[in-house]
Amino acid sequence: MKPFMLLKFRTMYWAEERAGTVEQAIREDARVTPLGRLLRATSLDELPQLFNVVRGEMSLIGPRPHAVEHDRFYMTRIPHYVRRFEVRPGLTGLAQISGARGGTPRIQDMQRRVDIDLEYIENASLPVDCLIFLHTVREVFESDSAY
């Protein structure tokens, strides 16, 4: 999969980062704007990604895309990480409805997400995608893992 510009509503104040790094948001992150808190809590910040889906860069369902810097970092640390690129990234995915949504401060957190992504890749089907979509709707309204 080639890199693409992921569309999102801006929810954070601009902050300088070291070249080649992207700092993940954390709970109560001071960089998040007041409106951004609402958009992130309701996942409405992801809505522009529907344009990525229409342009064929993403699917509705699949492994969530990561920043290129994160991909580079995890490819050297997590076995089979690159298998995530066998399918288009998704607006939502099995990992997001399986409790692996949110930050990945430890390698083990990302390893868990990758394991779930690989499970999806191996079992992807229209019925599975429909179930993921339905569970995503519930997750948006009931989860507190988005920040």
Image (cartoon, rainbow, N blue to C red):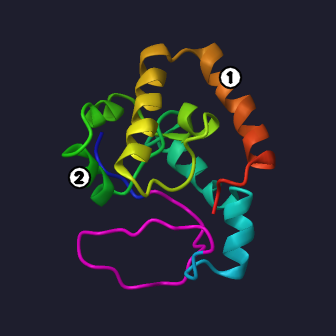
Vertical position of residue 24 compared to residue 142: above or below: below
Of the numbered discs in the image, which one, if any, rests on residue 72?
2
Secondary structure under the numbered disc 1 in the rendered image: helix
Local crowd size for mark 2, using a 10 Å CA cut-off: few (<14), some (14–19), many (≥20): some
Q: Which residue is mark 1?
A: 130
The amino acid marked with disc number 2 is Arg
Q: Is residue 133 magenta?
A: no
**Residue 39 horizontal side relative to residue 7, left or right:** right
The amino acid marked with disc number 1 is Cys
Vertical position of residue 66 compared to residue 96: above or below: below
Magenta range is 6-28
Q: Nearer the viewer, residue 58 or 32?
A: 32
Q: Position of residue 15 (x, y in %)?
A: 43, 84
Q: Position of residue 49 (x, y in %)?
A: 56, 52
| Quadrant where the C terminus is found in the figure | bottom right
The image quarter containing residue 1 is top left
The image quarter containing residue 61 is top right
- Residue beneath the point at 56% across and 62% down: 8
